[in-house]
Image (cartoon, rainbow, N blue to C red):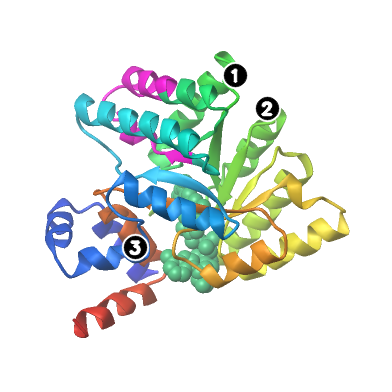
Amino acid sequence: MLMRNSLLWLAGNSTLRRQVMRSRLVRPLAGRFVAGETAEQAFATVAQLNRQGALVTLDYLGENVSSAEEATATRQMYVGLLDEIARRGLKCNVSLKLTALGLDISRTLCETNLRAILDTAQRHDNFVRLDMEGSDYTQITFDIFEQMFVAENRKNVGMVIQSYLYRSAADIERLNQLQARVRLCKGAYNEPPSVAYPQKSDVDKNYIALTRRLICDGNYPGLATHDSAIIDWVKQFTREQQIGRDRFEFQMLYGIRRDLQQQLIKEGHNLRVYVPFGEAWYPYLMRRLAERPANLFFILKSLRHK
Ligand SMILES: Cc1cc2nc3c(=O)[nH]c(=O)nc-3n(C[C@H](O)[C@H](O)[C@H](O)COP(=O)(O)OP(=O)(O)OC[C@H]3O[C@@H](n4cnc5c(N)ncnc54)[C@H](O)[C@@H]3O)c2cc1C
């Protein structure tokens, strides 16, 4: 827990970020979790995953941008990605963070950028997932989601719910009522016990309870986890309840539990891989290290063999 908290704290440390990103040793190692720095590299990965039978969601890395120019550049990147996904016929949607579209600068700027992306996705009959960030952003993400989905009747957008937050059961009831598409994950940020379960066993228990609600009453949920006990529970539950495999999808991160990804595809499950790319890989890498500090040893071992 101490290691997890320290790594998540370091994820927000800009001095370390500059040093790590300059390091010629760590840079290639980020490649275990990140599909490259350019869109072209990302498309090659998407095509390869599609050939292996996986669906993909593409994430252009970057968060908490501090200028309108950066936010607009992110929007342009996503518009280009959606055009190119359609042109190449890839089985791929996109995931984005609202703080990458300028949420820290102004809600209006963020919504304007998001609308342009949703319009493009709509034109190509594609889908946009709003990733969920730290708990300071949960309510505003929910509000912007409802503005798009309810007030503006844009149905090609979905949200993410984190099972570590106490509020998530109520959020899922609301999203099920709306028949909105939800990705369920455990949650990757450093949260205080006032808002999130401190014990991993409670987070896992809540994940199962929320999954049950989503599978029974939700709209094609994305069950984002590498936890094989939970995945086995889902398989058994859906078998018992005679719920078809077409009613939900499993989702996993690029480079993590590839064996399990292949197994699920072989068994005929829908499996979507979350593929991040771009130059701003530092906070993403630190969150992956925090989830499994053993990854640190993998990196240190590789450094020793350089
Ligand atoms: C598709 C997808 C999208 C996500 N989107 C969000 C989001 O929008 N917001 C958010 O807060 N979080 C997001 N996450 C991250 C998520 O919240 C968890 O932090 C992460 O998935 C680890 O939790 P787990 O469910 O795999 O279970 P855990 O109990 O943490 O892990 C179960 C097993 O999975 C393997 N594993 C897990 N993580 C790693 C790793 N980093 N490296 C190697 N092996 C690992 C290990 O074998 C581990 O024993 C997303 C995750 C996925 C899969």
Which mark, residue 178? Answer: 2
Q: Which residue is mark 1?
A: 150
Q: Position of residue 186 (x, y in %)?
A: 53, 55
Query: Which element type, helix, strand or loop, lies under badge 3?
Result: helix
Q: Secondary structure at mark 2?
A: helix
| First-in-chain label (1 vs 3) | 3
The magenta stretch is 94-116
| Contact, mark 2 vs mark 1 (Cβ under 8 Å) | yes
Give the residue furthest to the bottom: 305
| Residue sitting nearer the eye, 231 or 40 | 40
Q: Amino acid at mark 3?
A: Asn
| N-term mark: 2 or 3 | 3
Disc 1 residue crowd, few under 14, some 14–19, many 20+, Cα 10 Å: few
The quarter of the picture where residue 2 lies is bottom left
| Amino acid at circle 1 | Val
Q: Residue furthest front?
A: 88
